[in-house]
Amino acid sequence: MKYRWRIAPAQPVFIAALVRELGLSPLLSQCLLNRGLSEPEAIRTFLEPRLKWLADPFQLPNMASAVSRLFRAREAAEKVVLFGDYDVDGVTSCTLLAEVLQRLGWTVECYLPHRVEEGYGLSRAGVANCLERMRPSLLLAVDCGSTAAETIAWLKERGVDTIVLDHHQVTHPLPAACALVNPQLSEPTQPSFRELCSAGLAFKLAHALVKHGRIAGWAPAAEFDLRPLLDLVALGTIADLVPLRDENRILVTAGMQRLQTTTRPGLQALKEVAGINGPLSVYEVAFRLAPRLNAAGRLETAEDALRLLQATTLAEAQPLARKLDEQNRARQQIEQNIAQEVITSVRTRFDPAQDHVIVEGQAPWHIGVVGIVASRVLQEFYRPTLILGGEGEEWRGSGRSIEGFDLAEALRECDDLLVRHGGHAMAAGLTVRPERVGKLRDRLNAVARRRLSPEQLQPLLRLDAEVEASELTFERVRELARLEHTGHGNPPVHLVMRGMTHARPLTRMGADKKHAKLWVTDGRKVFEAVLWGVGDGPLPVGRFDLAFVPGLNEFNGSISIQLKVLDWETRV
């Protein structure tokens, strides 16, 4: 068994209440309870996410100060520069805010740092170049800046005010910005927007500007429609892997509807090069659109991604989309080479009992792909992983973590070894001198050995319920689809059926035969099941328990129930 299984406990009393009050099936009720939803009103909002349920944007910390400073800038005809990040969240946020501010009368430009030459976030090098090229009097840091106290103080000495719009963890003392709009500063009693990414925050800032203008009787605000911006919000939110619940769920649900039929030339061209002709799902956004937008910023600069999203015609957008597609192919090759090198090296000396954190670095490794490589190495060994690369006296790196290990907090315990660092519990960035990498590895492993139990070093598979084959009807699978859009923080329904066998021999699928199709049965009902990416690995034999995601598959005009296999356990 690849995973340790944990089946959610049945809650018959709560289930009966939801069945009675909301008319839901016991199985859907159980799945909702497993996602922390027990109150009927919260469940109604979850199952029918509407924009009207969004909280007032002025409930966000320091939003009023940000809006006030921006309106002063408009009145004084000051130049505002949006200083963004080079990932999808940063680029979509800048695109959204530039569009809103320009249409409402601000003088605004965008600046995206060069990953290799200027580094991550509101770096001194990036800000200095920005000031030299654009001469702003107000800098709006988007998707960065929460830890940039020194840079913001340096800007202030030069007469440049800073607004920070960011969702990353903050450090103390807080940066002396005119406004630090960060949901991490909100009260725990305000959970609806605490997990917004910067694209969501950009939408909230746009909403706050329009709302302020409408209250003041400002005509441009009265006519402004925010809804066409939601395609960008959905793209940034899905790409940034924030939990798809609360306000993120509302924004993604509305945004996915916009993405399906977007009139934005850049997104039309991007879908074309990604080969997307039919309906979009979260999967297509996360694994086909987002990587192509990320490719430019990973290898050099994200300027082409920004230009693509801001394109006004297909003629302008299509060459940019093709270029991003080519860069994505190059990125994939670089990433695969480094990942294979790391995995091969670690495998020769990996000690599961001692190695709780993997830290690897080499000067030639491209810093633009180290985050993706860290994710692949984590999948192979299931350990928090940091991958570093670069040239000269400092290496830059990116880390990915496992459940139960706050990587950003662990890096804070290594502050004396690092040049800089920041991020989230599950993903973080850092800069370190190469001669300190060994000490960093030892320190992080010591921290992890204190905080992680042996059980936590085996991946957990949370299962919503154990079901009988007879329960999996078309009606039930369609009802479970009401939990869409699923993703991080709102996983697909995971179920288990006991005592299954093969109804007929399995077949291998795909040009490289890395996938398998099974026909499984409990002796009465037969289901088609697919096992993706199994390669030459083992397959279920004899009698087994099957963990899976249920879904509907349409082929040649026929619809059938199909099970996506997650894991299995042989019965003796």
Image (cartoon, rainbow, N blue to C red):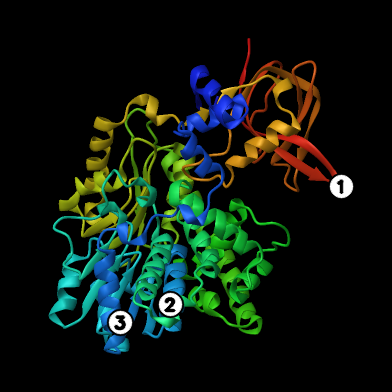
Along the polypeptide, which appears first: circle 3 or circle 1? Answer: 3
Along the polypeptide, which appears first: circle 3 or circle 2? Answer: 3
The residue type indicated by label 3 comes to Cys
Q: How many marks?
A: 3
- Residue 530 falls in image quadrant: top right
Residue 347, horizontal then vertical, whole percent: 45, 39
Select label 3 or label 1 by which is in front.
1
The residue type indicated by label 2 comes to Ala
Separation (CA) of disc 2 from disc 1: 49 Å
Would residue 242 be visible to someone looking at this image?
no
Along the polypeptide, which appears first: circle 2 or circle 1? Answer: 2
- Residue 55 falls in image quadrant: bottom left
Residue beneath disc 1 = 556
Q: Which quadrant would the C terminus be assigned to in this image?
A: top right
- Residue 545 falls in image quadrant: top right
Residue beneath disc 2 = 221
> Image check: 302 left or right of 454?
right
Viewer-closest of 152 and 296? 152
> Is residue 146 positioned above or below 132 on the image?
above
The disc at residue 130 is 3
The residue type indicated by label 1 comes to Asn
Element type at mark 3: helix
User: Going 51% across and 69% down the picture, which residue do you hit?
Assistant: 229
Residue 417, horizontal then vertical, whole percent: 18, 52
